Image (cartoon, helix red, strand yellow):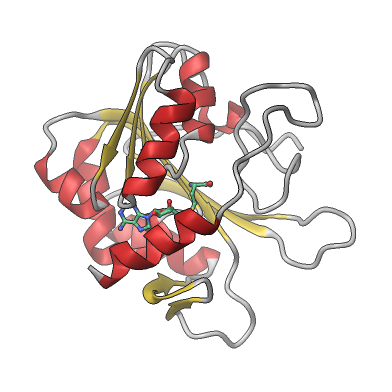
Amino acid sequence: MEVVEAWERYAQGRTPRREVNSAGARTWLNWTQYPDHGPDESILGDLQGRTVLELGCGTGCNLAHLSTLGATCTGVDISPTQHEKAVARWGHLPGLTFHTAEVSDYLSRTDSTFDVVLSIFGPVWFTDPERLLPLIRKRLTPGGVLAFSHKPPSAGSEPVGTLREARAVTRWDYTPEEWSALLTSSGYSNSKAEIIPPPKGQEVGTLLVRACTGILFYPPLRK
Ligand SMILES: C[S@@+](CC[C@H](N)C(=O)[O-])C[C@H]1O[C@@H](n2cnc3c(N)ncnc32)[C@H](O)[C@@H]1O
């Protein structure tokens, strides 16, 4: 309950994403903490006709973009306020469904399978990976992809800490090497964990992790 309240406070304090990005697009996917920066959805491969699940989808802006590319999209977020905002902004789009749920509960209950599971600064960072990674793995189709991003751990930080914005929330702050080992031991193959460099003038990059349930050659980071 404390965790839901923490994310509710977070949701209520957020300003909405811009209507249009610097390229003039009305929908887009952003893996990093900086606007108009980093790779786009192309690192997930072709999305037309694929089933996509986003864990911690917030106001749904990234997922809405994937639905405009022909994916059938499901978003899960623990915060009812985020759910309301997502439905208000994107509820008109076809092939896009939002649920209010804690991700481990959702993954334990659902019978659905997904070609792509993504999480951007989301619950993969805030949930014990030894519990969450196998739950995601069970819901991925053969050849399915898990991709997630969050800030890299800072030097000397503990691997398990709390989120500055919401202290009731635990954060699992692993290095690329630690994520790769966790993914392998949870049954994923071909994991790739890398740091997206920050934009000019910033110091902190973004950790991007991909893994799959089969053999896959990842599209490179283009930006
Ligand atoms: C930092 S925000 C990122 C939101 C969105 N992915 C984005 O990039 O704008 C983290 C989101 O994850 C959700 N969240 C955190 N832990 C969760 C959990 N265990 N289950 C479901 N949602 C969770 C929060 O409510 C919040 O909307």
Relative placement, left or right, of 190 versus 130 is: right
Residue 32, horizontal then vertical, whole percent: 64, 49
Q: Quadrant of residue 223?
A: top right
Relative placement, left or right, of 35 versus 134 is: right
Residue 95, horizontal then vertical, whole percent: 35, 15
Q: Residue at x 26, y 65 (%)?
A: 130
User: From the viewer's perspective, is residue 13 above or below residue 220?
Assistant: below
Residue 128 is at least partly visible in this image = no
Residue 108 is at least partly visible in this image = yes
Q: Quadrant of the N terminus?
A: bottom left
User: From the viewer's perspective, is residue 113 above or below residue 190?
Assistant: above
Relative placement, left or right, of 113 versus 181 is: left
> From this viewpoint, which residue is outermost toward the right?
201
Q: Quadrant of residue 182?
A: bottom left
User: From the viewer's perspective, is residue 169 above or below residue 176?
Assistant: below
Residue 90, horizontal then vertical, whole percent: 46, 24
User: From the viewer's perspective, is residue 7 above or below residue 217?
Assistant: below
Out of 122 and 26, give the one closest to the viewer: 26
Q: How many marks overall?
A: 0
Q: Quadrant of residue 9?
A: bottom left
Q: Residue at x 47, y 61 (%)?
A: 10
Q: Residue at x 41, y 45 (%)?
A: 82
Residue 190, horizontal then vertical, whole percent: 43, 45
Q: Residue at x 24, y 53 (%)?
A: 102
